[in-house]
Amino acid sequence: MADSSAVVDAEVLYEVSEHIATITLNRPDRMNTISGPMLGQLAELLLKADRDPQVRAIILTGSGKAFCAGLDLRGASEGKLGLEGASSPTNLDLRSTPPTVLFNLDTPTICALNGSAAGYGLDTALGCDMRIAAEGAKFAVAFTKRGVVPESGGTWLLPRLVGWSKAAELIFTGRTLSAEEAVTWGLASRVVPADQLQAEARRLAAEVAANAPLAVQAAKRMMRMGLSEGFDEHVHHVFLQLMPLVRTKDFGEAVAAFMEKRPANFEGR
């Protein structure tokens, strides 16, 4: 299965193959900095993948040498970022921006960091469920060096990913981590040679996609809810999610495959 909507000259590319959607930031000459139109395009494509019943995992990556160097500050200085008049909080709806959309997706997301992530690009990478980095990639938490704060989820995500003390150290100092340091700090799960990054990301995505998609999506919803729930409340909500799952065709297939000692063939229903 393939999606023909991946256009060569588009700033965000999209394709679907074997239940995996790959979304690629495509401004290599500008280190994939996010232009105003890209904000909407990326959010729309993430939602498109999440709504597609054939998509069971999403890979987010970049073209060229960088993953994403942040927002297009040159465009912002020229009034082309789409944030004009945003000095008033009422004029900017952060609920529809890519990092917020990423957090609320039910489909698992993998960030394949082909190069450096900085600023908004780092927040976007942190918004993915899993991160794999190419050798030489950098994680630049340089917000305070630019006179701002992590504006798109970083102050919420970093303490939960690495703990308060490490998050404070990263944010307050504006430190940049190598790919290997990012693994040590807990920001990425592995580092691979650059020429193996996409294949490794697809292997991980395929492993996710091989499982029952309704169960995977429910598990992600429960993990997200668990971030703000007490234990008793959370266990109750998990039970409510479990009951519909045991009535699905996929659950019956899983039981049959286990009894017959064969791989399960899940259909997402």
Image (spheres, rainbow, N blue to C red):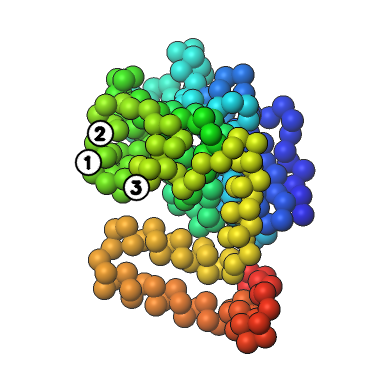
Three-letter amino acid code at disc 2?
Glu
The answer to whether 194 is drawn above or below residue 164 in the figure is above
Q: Which secondary structure, mark 3?
A: helix
Pick the residue in front: 89 or 237.
237
In the image: residue 11, left or right of residue 17:
left
Q: The N terminus lies in which quarter of the figure?
A: bottom right
- Look at mark 3 in the image and give the residue it sits on: 161
Please, is residue 251 above or below residue 206 in the view?
A: below
Q: Three-letter amino acid code at disc 1?
A: Ser
The answer to whether residue 14 is visible is: yes
Q: Residue at x 25, y 66 (%)?
A: 230
Q: Quadrant of residue 193?
A: top right
Residue wearing tag 2: 169
Q: Within the image, what quadrant is residue 18 found in? A: bottom right
| Residue 42 visible in the displayed image | no
SS under mark 1: helix
Tags 2 and 1 touching, CB below 8 Å: yes
Upstream in sequence: badge 2 or badge 3: 3
Residue at 67% over, 85% down? 260
